[in-house]
Image: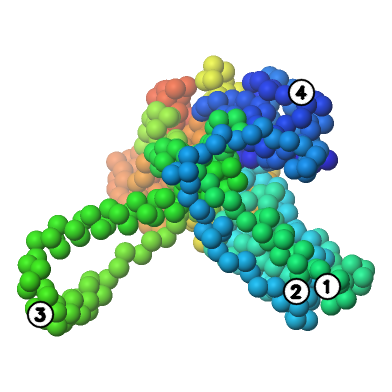
Amino acid sequence: MSDFMLPDIGEGIVECEVVEWRVNEGDEIAEDQPVVEVMTDKALVEITAPEAGRVTRLYVAKGDIAKVHAPLFAYEATGEVEFETPPRPAAREEDEVASPAAEAPPPALSTAPSAAHAGAASVAAKDFILPDIGEGIVECEVVEWRVSEGEEIAEDQPLVDVMTDKALVEITAPEAGTVTKLHVTKGDIAKVHAPLYAYVPAHAEPGEARPDVSQSSPTAPQEAQNRVSQNRVAPVASGGRGPYGRIPASPAVRRLVREHGLDLEAVAGSGKDGRVLKEDVLRFLEQGSQQQSSQQQGPQQQGEDPAAGAASPAPQAETASSAQPSRRDAGEVRVEPIRGVRAVMARRMVESASTVPHFHYGEEIDVTELLALRERLKPVAEAQQVRLTLMPFFMKALALAVREEPILNARLNPEVSEIHYLPEVNVGMAVDSKAGLIVPNVKRVEQRSVLEVAQEIQRLTAAAREGRVAQEDLKGGTISISNIGAFGGTYAAPIINVPELAIVAIGKSQWLPRFDERGEVVKRAIMTVTWAGDHRVIDGGTIARFCNAWRGYLESPETMLLHLG
């Protein structure tokens, strides 16, 4: 019995609602038969059967929520002999297009010891399935392999670093053994719940791990030849349809077709029963770009004199060769895919800027007394190996100001019909890591001392710079601080880190002339701050009162002593 895992059905979609089951437990199903309809937050999606068999269990009832990469239903697969699929519609002979696999000659079978050994290793190898590495994460980028094919590995040995849209994650070996194949190369995308690498366990029985292929019956090569012939892709019709009158394609392929504005019927499928594969779509797109390029070059070639071209081929060749160095001198466009943390940052910033009405509020804060206090406390912190910056004071004062305006530490429900006031103040801080912008947060700032907050900031900053922030440190933020002043900036208009409702950008501190209470000019340390609030629930008066309370604690830091718990 096999579990059918709900596949990726849309970018950023992690769950969906089961709208209608087309089958019941015990029903027989054919390959590509519609089994269930699910509703995402974007569209109604039809899920089809991956192969023929019999449904044994429906894990998610109608009206309930199904999770992506979680079991949706269970089934028992049947062979072609045991289960008859409905006859596929006959394709016209003129529409038949032989696939490359069908025309290619069968691979030569070798009985050499090396080939037999490789075959034995593949039989004994186990696939390591990439596990869940974070809530809502469905794929990741392979950053660095620490082992190569053929290397022996120990249990819990780090094997590969992968980059999710939140952090760098280290994958370790589940048991000792030997790596036989790396399924995903460096720089490529690995899918959660898909094979990442193959290995032979160290505790495998010798008989299992290395069967003697040389002693197999003389008919073994012929049987293998028959299997190769059976596994060839049969000729398919352009626009071929499966047994249920629809073009077979997975949800991920259909999503790719939609993203590029293509018609699924225009893409010739090379899979079984005309199934359109991802490679077919990419090949179709590549052919389209080549045709467009040839069309652009066509008018130039048509405008030339054919006779002149035939009479003097040598000068043309010289002209072409002489043009190449200038083209190289001009340089080429370097293309870099947006992946990992940068990809999620791009997606979230667009979502925030386009869906949340931002209200910005600027203020100047006199941090002269705060700088003096920090200088007095630095030796105490250094004695405990803690680097004391201004950020712990910013966070602690912010947690105290939340008591007066708790809406800045709240969230909206998805329907924007309720405000959820959060009991803890988890302050996020934007960090410019080597993987991109990430926002780890210090948990329960209202319960920590300034020194404890400083210790957490030091830990999170070091982890972020190395790209190894734990998933737990990235979750649960309630309000954020962006210290742009660390890079020399004075003003900034920050974008809210949804689902939070507010963020503050802190500029650099400057020694500027100011008038004191006697009207005399004095030198003061002035820091500019700019708040951004969700204007759906936070108005100008609210954010001004909150900023005034926060500024009061920073300009007179000794007042924070009155609120020590």
Question: What residue did someone put label 2 on?
Answer: 118
Q: Residues within 10 Å of mark 1 (few under 14, many from 20)?
A: few
Q: Position of residue 159 (x, y in %)?
A: 71, 67
Callout 2: helix, strand or loop? helix
Classify 10 Å Cα crowding around label 4: few (below 14), some (14-19), many (20 and above): few
Distance from the alpha carbon under mark 3 to that under mark 2: 57 Å
Q: Earlier in the sequence, mark 4 or mark 3?
A: 4
Q: Of label 2 and label 4, which has the lower sequence position? A: 4
User: Disc 2 to disc 4, how far (Cα)?
Assistant: 43 Å
Callout 4 secondary element: loop
What residue is shown at x 40% (from left), y 28% (from top)?
357
Q: Which dot marks residue 218? A: 1
Q: Position of residue 461 (x, y in %)?
A: 58, 57
Say which residue label 4 marks. 24
Q: Nearer the viewer, mark 4 or mark 1?
A: 1
The residue type indicated by label 1 comes to Pro
Residue 345, x across and y down, in percent: 48, 46
The N terminus, quarter of image: top right
Residue 116 visible in image: yes
Q: Amino acid at mark 3?
A: Ser
